[in-house]
């Protein structure tokens, strides 16, 4: 899971570099369609390996993909929400630093359990402590001494809000469908939506797409094909809030990648803000986990007494 966070964090560099060649919608459309192709190839290979191990007659029915209307509807909904979130993130990268984008968009880790309160999910004190720390960190990171916020940070905050909804929806749909097939449909829907918008409103030249090819390959094959698929597979048997914390290190890797690849630096104030946000992301899950362990231990102690 830490590798996934590293892939997602470093993908911000690819996203930023792509903006020098093509528009945000065209890039997002191409990378998600490529990601769908990567996952599709993985499914085909896994099915063939399973047939070879179990025998064609025994495995043919089990390996046959089950694509039905419910799967298509679920994937389309997830793809639409994902398209909105990633488009906000990609557009915002024009107007903010990679570290800001990485940490602010990671706020979904805090927002998800808070949304869970509305659905009557159990929420521990760590959620509120984490929210307070993350809010303080966001203030230090994004708001300068003149009390103004970077334009692109608003887009990243919007991305975090929409991604929170997407994470909740994945937690709802993933147990009902094959996670890999759900990923493929989701990526195709997201890719087609963004590609259509990109073709309609953005300039498109073959030479520009070739220039952006390395960023598209990295963002599509690794960030989408590997990263988002792990998210869907992991959430099949996990609560959305628990799955979200796994990727809380994304902002750290984004800041490191921005510094190494693009030479972006942060002020002391911004670094303190990043530290507070990371502490908030971790507190959001680690504190409730610690409390649950204590509660689980107390009955055992009482019985032994």
Image: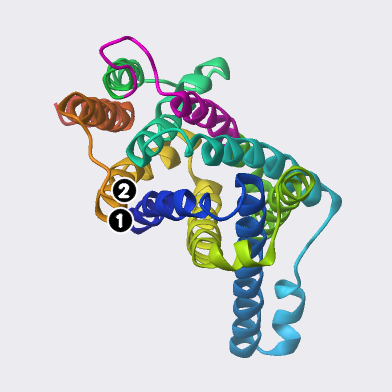
Most foreground residue, 125 or 210: 210
Crowdedness near tag 1: few (<14), some (14–19) or many (≥20) residues, C-alpha within 10 Å: few
Q: Quadrant of the C terminus?
A: top left
Q: Residue at x 52, y 21 (%)?
A: 115
Which stretch did the figure color magenta? 142-168
- The numbered disc on residue 261 is 1
Q: Tag 1's secondary structure?
A: helix
Q: Residue at x 54, y 26 (%)?
A: 158
In the rendered view, tell whether residue 256 sits above or below residue 273: below
Crowdedness near tag 2: few (<14), some (14–19) or many (≥20) residues, C-alpha within 10 Å: many
**By what rule are the colours in the image chosen?**
rainbow
Residue 282 rendering spot, x and y as whole percentages: 28, 33
- The residue labelled by disc 2 is 258
In the rendered view, tell whether residue 296 sits above or below residue 177: above
Image quadrant in which you'd find residue 267: top left
Residue 184 rendering spot, x and y as whole percentages: 68, 59
In the rendered view, tell whether residue 247 sits above or below residue 183: above
Marks 2/1 in contact by CB < 8 Å: the verdict is yes
Q: State yes or no: residue 159 in magenta.
A: yes
Give left or right: position of 266 versus 11: left
Q: Residue at x 31, y 51 (%)?
A: 262
Most foreground residue, 28 or 108: 28
């Amino acid at each position: 899971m830490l590798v996934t966070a590293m892939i997602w964090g470093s993908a911000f560099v690819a996203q930023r570099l792509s903006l020098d060649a093509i528009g945000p919608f065209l890039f997002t459309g191409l990378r998600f369609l490529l990601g769908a192709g990567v996952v599709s190839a993985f499914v085909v290979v896994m099915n063939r390996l399973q047939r070879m191990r179990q025998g064609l007659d025994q495995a043919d029915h089990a390996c046959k993909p089950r694509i039905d209307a419910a799967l298509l509807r679920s994937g389309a909904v997830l793809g639409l929400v994902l398209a909105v979130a990633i488009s906000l993130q990609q557009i915002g990268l024009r107007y903010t630093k990679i570290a800001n984008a990485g940490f602010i968009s990671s706020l979904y880790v805090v927002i998800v359990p808070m949304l869970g309160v509305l659905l009557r999910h159990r929420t521990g004190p760590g959620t509120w402590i984490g929210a307070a720390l993350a809010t303080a960190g966001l203030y230090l990171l994004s708001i300068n001494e003149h009390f103004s916020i970077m334009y692109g940070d608003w887009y990243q905050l919007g991305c975090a809000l929409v991604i929170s909804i997407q994470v909740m929806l994945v937690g709802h749909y993933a147990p009902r469908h094959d996670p890999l097939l759900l990923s493929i449909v989701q990526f195709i829907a997201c890719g087609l939506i963004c590609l259509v918008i990109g073709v309609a409103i953005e300039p498109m030249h073959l030479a520009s797409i070739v220039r952006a090819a390395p960023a598209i390959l990295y963002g599509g094959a690794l960030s989408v094909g590997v990263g988002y698929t792990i998210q869907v597979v992991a959430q099949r048997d996990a609560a959305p809030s628990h799955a979200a914390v796994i990727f809380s290190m994304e902002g750290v890797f984004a800041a490191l990648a921005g510094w190494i690849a693009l030479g972006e630096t942060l002020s002391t104030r911004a670094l303190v803000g990043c530290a507070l946000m990371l502490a908030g992301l971790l507190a959001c899950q680690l504190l409730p986990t610690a409390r649950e362990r204590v509660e689980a231990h107390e009955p055992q102690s009482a019985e032994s007494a």
